[in-house]
Amino acid sequence: DPDEIYISTPGPVGIFGLFMTKLLNTKSIGIFHTDFTLQAHEIIGHGDMDNIIENSIRLFYSYMDEIRVPTKEYIRILADRGYDESKMRVFRRGIDTLRFSPRSTGREFIANRFGISDSPVLLYAGRISKDKNLDFLVDVFMNIRTSHANVILLIVGDGPYLKTLRQRYNRDNGIIFTGRLDRVLLPEIYSGADVFLFPSTTDTFGMDVIEAQSCGLP
């Protein structure tokens, strides 16, 4: 006998949740986490597939009583794409600031863990996939290296694009790939780096951004 059902993704479980709201006559609240249309465009680059995905997902959310969206800007974006603006509300994000807070041992941790001593450290943390715009990130970094040869790019995370990037670049290029790390280590890494980089143009809201900010990393 639920009061509300929150539906997090437009996949099989989300469709089941939507079915249950109709069966139980319960309020449905859809959470728009991921812009699958933009992600598919970055990965596949096919206009027809973009339209199929966009129409399907917009139809899915049209059955919701309310749609929670990460930011006011994304409400505007979705409204321009045909979503019902009257249904949309901002879904506020938060993190545990007792866990994600500045650590005085961050620099020492990075030095010991990755063998980085006096070099400036640029950090990316997140899923390693093509839609995250990591090729652009590496191009920018390589340009920086032409005038600052000692700077290091630390790429933290795992994903389907990691193997490809590792084959192209290594520590000789100034890039260190850590792979998947335990989440409890992230505050130390955020605190020890110098600048956080988030190149994605398809994310609706990067939680890594506010994790980094909460640890004092610009």
Image (cartoon, rainbow, N blue to C red):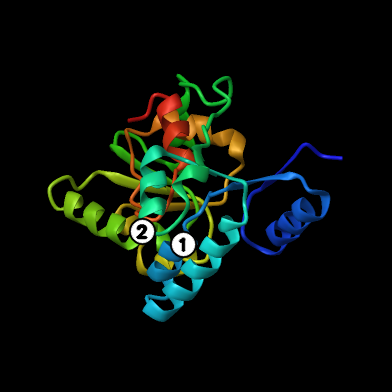
Quarter assignment of residue 57: bottom right
Residue 100 lies, with reference to residue 32, above or below; the image says above
Residue type, label 2 = Leu
Residue at the spot of label 1: 129
Q: Position of residue 120 (x, y in %)?
A: 28, 37
Residue pictured at 33% horizontal, 51% vertical: 199
Q: Residues within 10 Å of mark 2 (few under 14, many from 20)?
A: some
Q: Position of residue 128 (x, y in %)?
A: 47, 58
As drawn, the residue found furthest toward the right would be: 1
Query: Tags 2 and 1 in contact by the CB under 8 Å rule?
Result: yes
Frontmost residue, 201 versus 24: 24
Q: Which mark is residue 58?
A: none
Q: Which mark is residue 134?
A: 2
Residue type, label 1 = Ser
Frontmost residue, 40 versus 102: 40
Residue 32 lies, with reference to residue 97, above or below; the image says below
Residue pictured at 51% horizontal, 61% vertical: 58
